[in-house]
Image (cartoon, rainbow, N blue to C red):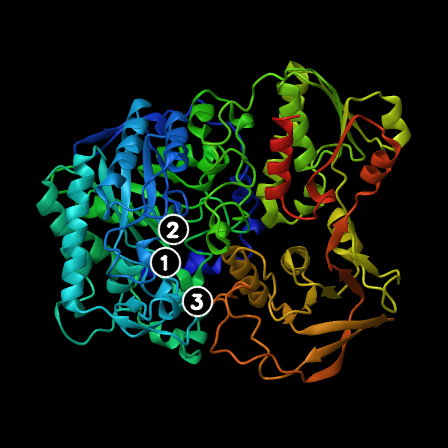
Amino acid sequence: MEERQNHKVKEIIDGLGDWFSDEERLKQGRMTDELYPYEKLFEPIQINKLKIKNRIVMAPMGNVSMADETGKPGQKMIKYFIERAKGGAGLITSGMTPVSWKADPSYGDLDSTGIFPRIDSHRTAYSGWRAIAEGCHAYGARFFIQLAPGMGRVGNPECLTKKYRLPISSSWNNNWYIPQILCRPLTDRECRRIIRNTGEIAVNARELGIDGVYLHGHSGYLIEQMTDPAYNRRKMGRYKDWQSFGLDMVREIRRRCGAYYPIHYRIDLSLALRETYGEKMDEDKILKKFRNGRTADMTLDYMENLVKAGVDVFDADLGGYDSWWLPHPPNGMPPGVYMEIANLVKEHFDKRGIVSNAGFPIPVMAVGKLGYPDLAERALREGKCDMIMLGRPLLADPYWPQKVYSGRVKEIIPCIGDHEGCLGQFAVGGHPHCAVNPRTGFEDVYQDDMKPAERKKKIAVVGAGPAGAVLACTAARRGHEVVLYDKNDKAGGMLIPGSRPKIKFEIANYMEYINNEIRRISRDYKLKTLFGTDVNRDMLKAGSFDAIVTCTGTKPSKPPLPGINLPYVITGADFLKNPETANKAEKVVVIGGSDVGCEAAYMLAYEMGKKVKVVEMTPYFMKKTCTSNRFFMIHHLEAAGVELINCARLIGIDEGLVEIMRNTSDTVPDPYITWTPALADNIANPFVKGLEEAERPMKLEADLVLICTGAIPDDRLYYECIKEHTAPEIYNIGDSFTGGRVLEAVKAGYALGTTI
């Protein structure tokens, strides 16, 4: 049994690169409704003595910057949670909430302020938490608060320069962001204080009407650091036993809260570092420290002991910050990625007859890309898990449960897995929101946004990418007469080629949703679509529109270098529009290591079997991409043998050759490192030497070259219309304003659509 459990972890990790070669698994990631009515999803379930109305759980997603600077939940945070309760989820869980602010200096900024919601500080914070619990209860949902004693080595190391305090951990561990900074070990006395604080917070939560507590024991945070020998290498004291910290914490909560207050524990079955990095675990000086991590069988033994101590329910996945894509699965990972992990835990508990102290079975929640109704329902019917935990799908559409229950699966706004509105915001000072749902995280702003327009207008929208599609549908719903033009035969814009790689199946889902929504709005409102139409200023002038909105996208930016116009040199977008252009090529060189270049390289290597090299001018590939997505892509490009060449610039292209100048200095970072992040430009690492120049020319063989050096806004039509006063109101949004992402395009389309 133990061998099977550990083998399953290896099998999952090894299968993440080319999982889509299994067509049946790829189909599981479609928004289908074959199993309607969804009976198992909407069965009630018991957690301790608490009844949950259905099997759908909102996952914790880090409510940073949603409370005020003292940690008091404000209207933004309150309405965010209540919206998910209105949408029909049975159980709502909060994001990470500190229980011991002073114990971990990385939690806060100066003067006891910070970005996290708090329940351990002023009693004035209590009213916000009570409002959340009562608001959820009004819609029949339960609410658990996620408690975290600290971030430890994955916390912000700026506490060293701002507060002159070392970050903390279980042992002398390297800080994740800046590995040159060591985190000091907590003393046993400090550990006991944290545990007492956790018990106090738990009983306060109970008295505030919060239905249960949820311990953040996975992904490499402080509980994980104390309860995984990868990080806990203590030689003396009570907490050298890697299980003791977690068990003592659960016992303290149970002592303070009584036998029947639900305790939920989040855990990874394994960090899976050895399975992920193989020989690098013995070679890299940082990874070496973490070689002796918890195996699956060790974790299951620990989980049994947690149940004896008082835990009532678990969710389980794999990985931590050192392989960040595992606990935060990006768009390239498969649907239901950790279903077999939940099944392993459930089988183990069932086989051993494990029940809670209250005498109830232990529900096991499945996590990881489960926002596909048929997949979720089938997992419950087959007994692989007891509950379905949804994170980003409930950001994309809070009404996922209601729509699934009523059979309106085609109306669900699907998550696209880009992490730009949710996880990616944490590093850039934002709060959780969503690329495809402009109301998420702004429920306090958009409250009466579908108010009928006071003056109905005739509006032309040019371009049916995300910005134009959202704008057209929103404006039409408010009563405007809208004409939507696009040169393609369907909506989607750059999502059409962007959805071609099989790992971009979620983009394909979103594009299908956009087109379904346009058809639905066209039936019920005054929205007319003219696809396959090239629009010019004279056509718009003749239409006598009250307002014109140009959403005309971008045009590729190509460096003016020798050979750039040779026949076997094409743009990345051209390749994605017509992948057959690469059929006869064996060796492909991609110029530009941003998202498009790396995703094209992934498709060429995994789907088409090509030998690929990617050339990037800067030190880091995909620098502006969310770390989870970036790490996944880089790790699996390396596994496929794709050569990543950073700090290199294109000189020219000749017949069969690409000429570059490459910096060969020892200061050039290893492009394949995925266990330490590339810091944002506004955070300097004082321990890293500056980049030295030592360029030398190189020639790369190629019979196909993809130019992926970015794009610039195509705003010609907008300025032509402005110059000629083509309409009383003229707007320019989406990529034709600033070539960017779905996130900005959707927000712009919605903002203008609700106010025009």
Name which of mark 2 and mark 3 comes first in the sequence.
Answer: 2
Amino acid type indicated by mark 1: Asp
Mark 3 lies on residue: 177
Q: Nearer the viewer, residue 231 or 112?
A: 112
Using the image, determine if residue 736 lies above or below residue 582: above
Give the quarter of the image for residue 178: bottom left
Whether residue 151 is visible, yes or no, is: yes
Mark 1 lies on residue: 109
Q: Are marks 2 and 3 in contact (CB under 8 Å)?
A: no
Q: Is residue 175 left or right of residue 332?
A: left
Mark 1 to mark 2 CA distance (whole Å): 8 Å
Q: Tag 2: Cα neighbours inside 10 Å, few (<14), some, or many (≥20)?
A: many
Q: Secondary structure at mark 1?
A: loop
Mark 2 lies on residue: 115
Q: Is residue 732 left or right of residue 677?
A: right
Q: Is residue 622 left or right of residue 168?
A: right
Q: Secondary structure at mark 3?
A: loop
Percent position of residue 643, x then y = 64, 71
